[in-house]
Image (cartoon, rainbow, N blue to C red):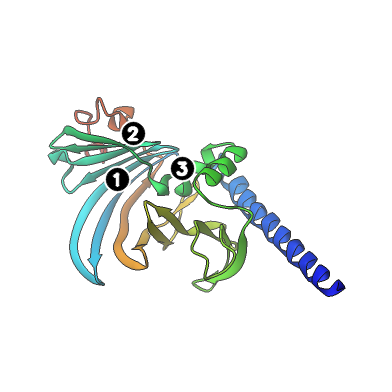
Amino acid sequence: MSRPVIFSFCLVLSSNLFAQKGVQYLKALYTKNHHHWYHTMTFVQTTENYRNDSLIRKATWYEAVKLPNDLRIDFDTPSKGNFVLYKKDSVYRFQNNSLRNVNADTNPFLFFIGGMYYMPFDSVLQYLDTKGYDVKKGYQTVVDGAPAYVIGRDNESDTTNAFWIDTKDQRIVRIAERNRGQLLDAHLLNHKQLPKGSTETKVDIYINGKRVQVESYDQVKPDVPLDDALFDPSTAATARHWLQYQ
């Protein structure tokens, strides 16, 4: 009768160790980059859309990030006025420089690409909890030949929200998040070291296991001056675009 008790105790102990290790890896990542991460960044993105593994569309997007909560994406030529603004928990869509609609939504990438480093660590844990990431769950694995730790899942067959940390370079290299019944799985690739922090320069995006988009960054410029008006829905359409300064 003692064996099941010992076995159960070992399972609990193992679970607690993985829970502690996940928070430790997250805390190490946060400590490394807190107060030492870019605040703004602009880049030109080549966006490829796929359907049934076939390329169906290719476009150029012009993106500007202002951490922790602001992202502006201009589609094709910025002068046409077709763009979207992500503002913390809202998204504003413009067409021909006119606001077309506003929705309650978030961009899942902003937090992971740097927004978390502008928050207190307790707020980071709280955010992850509200988004369905269980930091008490985790396991070790390998990503592209590098050691990694998965936070939010117990094993490879688990499909709950999770993110992967490259434990050697201390970078987030993959994010999986369920939203409205679909599983978004983003692989962050080809990282480039910056004066403050780093950035992926390629993102491979899957929805429910099927590739839907590949993003490639060019002309990456961190910590460039960006006018607040570019991210303000009331002035974004008339603000001088950042591309005109470069």
- State the residue lying farthest toward the right: 2
What amino acid type is highlighted by mark number 3? Tyr
The one of 169 and 16 positioned closer to us in this rendering: 16
Question: Pointer 1: what residue?
Answer: 63
- State the residue lying farthest toward the front: 1
Residue at the (17%, 49%) spot, across then down: 76
Residue at the (49%, 56%) spot, across then down: 161
Badge 2: residue crowd in 10 Å (few <14, some 14–19, many ≥20): some
The image quarter in which residue 213 lies = bottom left
Q: Which mark is residue 245?
A: none
Q: CA distance from mark 3 to mark 2?
A: 13 Å
Specify which label sits upstream in the sequence, 2 or 1.
1
The image quarter in which residue 5 lies = bottom right
Question: Pointer 3: what residue?
Answer: 38
Q: Which mark is residue 226?
A: 2
Is disc 3 placed on a helix, strand or loop?
A: loop
Q: Is residue 229 left or right of residue 196?
A: left
Judge whether residue 34 can be spotted in this image. no
Badge 3: residue crowd in 10 Å (few <14, some 14–19, many ≥20): many
Residue 245, compared with residue 215, is above or below; it is: above
The one of 148 and 162 positioned closer to us in this rendering: 162
Q: Is residue 107 left or right of residue 246?
A: right
Q: CA distance from mark 1 to mark 3?
A: 15 Å
Q: Nearer the viewer's eye, disc 2 or disc 1?
A: 1
Residue at the (60%, 62%) spot, across then down: 167
Badge 1: residue crowd in 10 Å (few <14, some 14–19, many ≥20): many
Residue 91 % position (x, y): 31, 38
Is disc 2 placed on a helix, strand or loop?
A: loop
Residue 223 % position (x, y): 41, 40
